[in-house]
Amino acid sequence: MSLEELYSYLRDYMDPESEKARKRYKALKNFFNWTVKKALLPDGRRLSVLDLCAGTGIAGAALLKVLREWGVEASLTLVDKRKDDILKVEGWLNGDGEVYGAVMDCLDDLSKLGEFDVVLLWGSTMPHFDPYQAADLFTNVSRALTPSGVFMIEEMDRFGAFFYRRAYREVVPEVKGEDYTVVSLDEGYDPLRGVIVRGYYRLPGWEKIGEIETRYWDLAGLAGMGKLVFEEARIIPRKEHGNAGVGDVLYFRNPKVQRA
């Protein structure tokens, strides 16, 4: 089993054929409807949306649907390394909407894809970025946004949860199949990059599948980093937006960095 196969077991939260994902899609629509009511999105009768590390495009598709329901013309561009995931966006939209896909890394030059009014990074993806990569990500996104553009990140305060509340576990069961279990183990810390290495093993037999480097971010740290390149940077806690199906959201508006 490869890490790509491992991810396939963990993707039911965004697969259009999954009941769990359909419930999340509805929750995302409710959240984005709230953002429209609160005037958190740029003004305009036509908006362009960029969904990064998009997977099946569940978040971008939900926003596209909401915008259209509010009478706003919108286009959606999805960025992910996995083409097969991007193609599943049709499961959310059924051909309804202007949608483009780009198989690329979100640290590549996003401005080559055009200029966007809203950029999303959904699904608590930030642990995949070490601090240096996160700084590059914020700068990259800011250069792809319009002057009044908005960048939103769904995330959780992992530092508070894992260390302050002592919820961190060295051994974590990740996937359980009919005749096997996949667990992850803490296999070290890189102080130069600020990441913890997790090793993944298949039981029984302790067959090693691979490793993932993980950064356990705190919300304030990410908001502070975003403040360097955005005029407005704040945290929208779940209790503020009131949607149990969506996590805390980092909200950034009006990029300081100009397009190249």
Image (cartoon, rainbow, N blue to C red):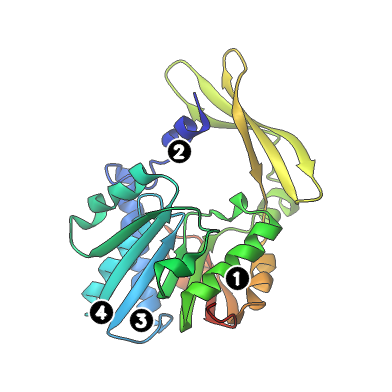
| On screen, residue 6 above or below 95 | above
Q: Which residue is mark 2?
A: 10
Give the mark nearest the N terminus, 3 or 2: 2
Can residue 22 be seen here? The reply is: yes
Q: CA distance from mark 3 to mark 1?
A: 28 Å
Q: Which mark is residue 72?
A: 4
Q: Residues within 10 Å of mark 1 (few under 14, many from 20)?
A: many
Q: Residues within 10 Å of mark 4 (few under 14, many from 20)?
A: some
- The quadrant in which the C terminus is found is bottom right
Q: Which residue is mark 3?
A: 37
Q: Secondary structure at mark 4?
A: loop
| On screen, residue 186 above or below 44 | above
Q: Between tags 3 and 4, which lies in front?
A: 4
Q: What residue lies at 29% left-to-right and 70% top-to-bottom?
A: 75
Can residue 242 be seen here? The reply is: no
Q: Between tags 4 and 1, which lies in front?
A: 1
Q: Position of residue 141 (x, y in %)?
A: 53, 69
Amino acid carrying mark 2 in the image: Leu
Give the mark nearest the N terminus, 4 or 1: 4
Q: Which mark is residue 139?
A: 1
| On screen, residue 21 above or below 205 | below
Q: Residues within 10 Å of mark 2 (few under 14, many from 20)?
A: few
Q: Which mark is residue 175?
A: none
Q: Secondary structure at mark 2?
A: loop
Are the two marked residues, 3 and 2, in contact with CB atoms closer than 8 angstroms? Answer: no
Q: What residue lies at 48% left-to-right and 32% top-to-bottom?
A: 6
Q: Secondary structure at mark 3?
A: helix
Question: Is 100 on the left-hand or right-hand side of 10?
Answer: left
Q: CA distance from mark 3 to mark 4?
A: 13 Å
The image quarter containing residue 160 is: bottom right
Q: Position of residue 240 (x, y in %)?
A: 50, 73
Amino acid carrying mark 3 in the image: Lys
